[in-house]
Amino acid sequence: MYSIIKNINKIFDHRVRLGIMSALMVNDFVDFITLKELLDVTDGNLASHLKALEKVEYIHITKEFIGKKPNTKYSTTPIGTEAFQKHISALEKIIKMQR
Amino acid sequence: MDKKDYLKDISEIKDIMNRSTRFMSLSGISGILAGIYALIGGFVAYKLLLDYGRSMYGSSVLPLSILELILVGIAIVVALLSVFTAYLFTKRKAKKNNEKVWTKASKQLMSSFLVPMLAGGLFTLLLIYRGYYGLVAPITLIFYGLALINASKYTLSMIKYLGGIELILGLLAMVFFGHGILFWMLGFGVLHILYGTLIYFKFDKA
């Protein structure tokens, strides 16, 4: 049991961070506005969670311009992908055990 | 966190993965209506062809080239009406589901559907131009089926099976050559009504 709990990642212990990772896992990249609409959160809230994920190098940020408008795109890093997969399989194992 | 929270986490992960890659607000009613347009168009075309066949023995009523134009016209009207209806009802359903109509997923859905459809449409017009009328029904069904299978990864997964059935109908229309209109009405009429009803009861009603 201990080894499974160990794989539950504290970083993903929040709805918004879990949501960001879920969206990035199935897309090559997602931009800020799309994430905001998808998760239904405020700019500030989303930005702070994105920063937290960037700090542990789970996501990668690309800044570019479409015309004159800045466009920030996010994608997962290999470390982030691995961490998220571990987290999901730990969740699934715990659910199975408790059944 | 207890068990309930973990379950909620998993279902939320699945939900976001789906919503960020698939456009789910396809309308069942618009499928039913598209099917009805196709059946009406098919009946009219069938009637015109019967009349034409009869008139061959007596005095000719319509020249062949005019009949051709009318048949192509019916098909285009049915297609345009269906697209317009689909757009209206999908917009309404998306609004109800709190989903935006123009998302990355819906754009991918459109482009993955339209590329095979446009190729098939142009190919069909060329078939008519070259005089291969018998191939029109099988080819349109086959291209439509392929377009649906291609687009299904960006929307309700059941669309894949609709595409598969359309594809098989197209191939059968080639086996039972000469009954094009019948297969066309089955594929674009009856199947759309069936699938539209299925989507309506599974997703729209709630």
Image (tube, coloured by chain):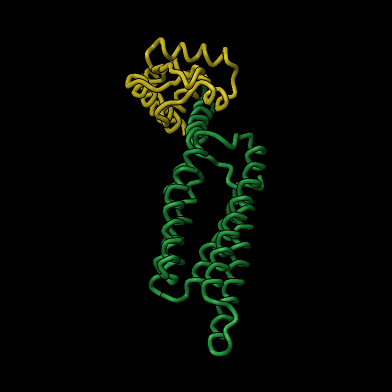
Quarter of the image for residue B38 reads bottom right
Residue pictured at 48% horizontal, 23% vertical: A31
Image height of B206 relative to A20, above or below: below
- x and y percentages locating residue B94 in the rendered image: 62, 39
Quarter of the image for residue A7 reads top left
Quadrant where the image shows the C terminus of chain B:
top right
Image height of B186 relative to A90, above or below: below
The tally of labels here is 0
Residue pictured at 55% horizontal, 27% vertical: A38
Quarter of the image for residue B123 reads bottom left
Q: What colour denotes chain A?
A: yellow
Q: Is residue A48 visible?
A: yes
Furthest-bottom residue in this view: B58
Q: Nearer the viewer, residue B184 or B3?
A: B184
Image height of B197 relative to A33, above or below: below
- x and y percentages locating residue B158 in the rendered image: 49, 50
Q: What colour denotes chain B?
A: green
Q: Nearer the viewer, residue B188 or A36?
A: B188
Q: Can residue A15 be seen in this view?
A: no
- x and y percentages locating residue B13 in the rendered image: 48, 30
Residue pictured at 57% horizontal, 89% vertical: B58
